[in-house]
Image (tube, rainbow, N blue to C red):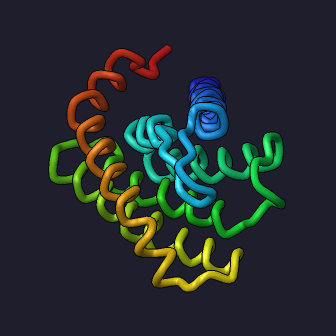
Amino acid sequence: MQKKNEDKIFTLTCLALLTAMQIVIARFLAIPVTESIRFSFSFIPVVIAARRFGILGGVVVYGLGDFLGAMIFPTTGAYFPGFTLTAAVSGLIYGLYLAKKGGAVRIILSVLTSQILCTLLMNSYWVSTLYGSDFGAVLLSRVPQSIVMSVLQIVFMLLLLEKICSVIRFKK
């Protein structure tokens, strides 16, 4: 019983630290291109959480990170729950593909699924809804960002994900 409680506390602590990292990277280190397009490496703590803690880890770090980041450090306007839903879905996708498994195919599929479903479709829909813009125009304007981020994420994850996870180890 004591061991289970220690494991739960350890997991919560790791997820809290990864969530804090996600917030800092997303809110302070992102590179804005336009009001609705930015380049960010906030996926790094998420894929680490998904790799180590599975679906729940990915969902918590991305979803909670987006929500808390928007509440604590608002950037453009009021909080919009659609973006948090997108973040949680993206974390879920990473968790499904990367949980305790790796490999180039899983990494590529996780990135492409997340980019197409979340970045292109869901976020484009939210942006078009928020600003009253044409969905097709918003979608097309986000394609270059999605392509660049897909390449960056795939390269990063193929080269460094396992190395980072092995260095961090997440062991007591």
Q: How many marks?
A: 0
Most foreground residue, 29 or 90: 29
Q: Residue at x 73, y 52 (%)?
A: 67
- Whole-percent x, y for residue 26 in the image: 60, 40
Please indicate, yes or no, whether residue 5 appears anywhere in the rendered image: no
Q: Residue at x 32, y 20 (%)?
A: 166
Q: Residue at x 79, y 41 (%)?
A: 73
Residue 21 lies in what quarter of the image?
top right
Above or below, 110 relative to 27: below
- Whole-percent x, y for residue 91 in the image: 49, 54
Most foreground residue, 87 or 48: 87
Q: Residue at x 32, y 50 (%)?
A: 148
- Whole-percent x, y for residue 92 in the image: 47, 58
Please indicate, yes or no, whether residue 114 appears anywhere in the rendered image: yes
- Whole-percent x, y for residue 157 in the image: 28, 37
Is 67 left or right of 1, judged from the image as shown?
Answer: right
Above or below, 125 relative to 80: below
Is 101 left or right of 96, judged from the image as shown?
Answer: left
Is 81 left or right of 144, judged from the image as shown?
Answer: right
Quadrant assignment for the N terminus: top right
